[in-house]
Amino acid sequence: MPTKTGLVRKNLLNWPANQLLQNIKINMRRHLTLLLLIAISSSTPAQARGEEYCKLLMHGAAEYDAARYPQAETLLNQAVAQQPNNIVCRIERGRCLWRLGKFNQAISDFDTALKLHPNRNLTIQTLTFRVTANQSLKNWPAVISDCNKLLQLEEHDAFACAQRAMAYDRLGKRSLAQKDYDQCHRLVPRNKSYLAVQRLIDAEADVQDKFAAGIKYLDGHIRAHPYDADAYYTRAGLYSQLGKPKETMADYDASIKLSPVRFMVQYQRAKYLASQKLYKQAVEGFTDALEQAPGNDHVLLERAESYAKMGDYARSISDYSAMAALHPQEEDPLHFRARVYALDKQYERALSDYNTVIKLAPEQAANYKERADIYERLGRREMAVRDRKKAAELLAAPVN
């Protein structure tokens, strides 16, 4: 779930190697399907003949792919009832339960799967999914524990390294987080042109000179290697830092033309368009990115913000609602949605969201301030005064 805090986490989103981490998430569905087929083909003859069970499992997986999670849960519950000790079925239902916000139940399924002694590949898959479930519960020690197990199984697992870094960051252990982020960069090396640019940038003292030096190098590199999509992507980022929108967009477009299936390029291009207040084009870009990474939190967040700035409150609310459904224990999507409801003058709905947000994050003074404004709009002045008083108390309280 994206937030507006955590500088170390933000840095991760801006490095090209993160594209591989995104691809890992995008392709997990395909990997699990292959594992499912392997598990069925390697099971006992009696299990292999369980036609009804196999149909339930495959239909449940199909409903999951179509984002019809309640229907998928019903089918997978039936499959588990028939074969409660089937590892793949437990993993599949656990993922579905996570999507439905039933995080503890999802973790229970993943726990069961691990107790059934899966092979190495299935163990890695299960631990990976349990990491995501514990992240949803903000159980950062459990995230770190599972990431440690993943790294014991595969010491070069960049995904586990990145998730552990994020967990350390949430726990305020910034030095450990930065160490893991640095390791991510080593595990998934950036392209050669990027590394050369980084060396040039590091050698320059002035910020403007840093970017200019990088662009000068990439100009020559692209002349020699005109089909290097990563080089265009890297140069686009440098141009954006120098405030050159025309050159920035030209390089993003060149990178996408050379390599169309590039989630991170699509995402960063759309973010840049939004930063230039070209919200309609930004929305189109975010939509393209979502085709490659359906349900991606970061993209939904950015697209919802762009819709709101366009004044298309209905679509903005829809995107925030999708995020809230995926992460019912997170306050951010409800908080953002409450603001859009307020902009759309749907004050009762905004109030309902703020009530939930304050239950989830009762120590945030800003939430009380914003709810006070909604009370004012609704003519409930006494409640507004009470909330402003509470906000002042929280702001005056000493920080531990």
Image (cartoon, rainbow, N blue to C red):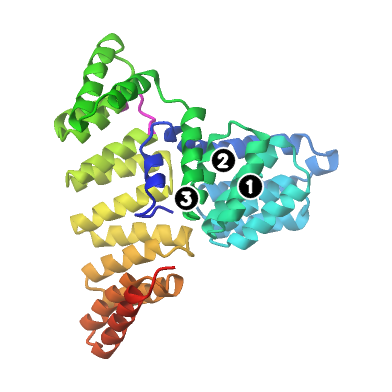
Graded by Cα atoms within 10 Å as few (under 14), some (14 to 19) or many (20 or more), the crowding at tag 3 reads: many
CA–CA distance in space, label 2 to label 3: 14 Å
Of badges 1 and 3, the one in the foreground is 3
Which residue shows up at 35% across the image and 73% down it? 354
Quadrant of the drawing holding the N terminus = bottom left
Q: Quadrant of residue 35?
A: top right
Q: Position of residue 260 (x, y in %)?
A: 35, 28
Instruction: Identify whether 376 is placed above or below 337.
Output: below
Q: Observer-nearest residue: 282 or 362?
A: 362
Would you name the residue on which mark 1 appears? 146
- Return the residue at label 2: 160
Spatial distance from mark 1 to mark 3, Cα to Cα?
16 Å
- In the image, what residue type sits under mark 3? Asp
Q: Are marks 2 and 1 in contact (CB under 8 Å)?
A: yes
Are dots 2 and 3 in contact, CB under 8 Å?
no
Q: Say above or below: 353 vs 135.
A: below
* Residue 238 position within the rendered picture, expressed as x and y whole percent measured from the top left: 24, 30
Q: Residue at x 39, y 51 (%)?
A: 6
**Which amino acid is tagged 2?**
Ala
Q: Which residue is mark 3?
A: 169
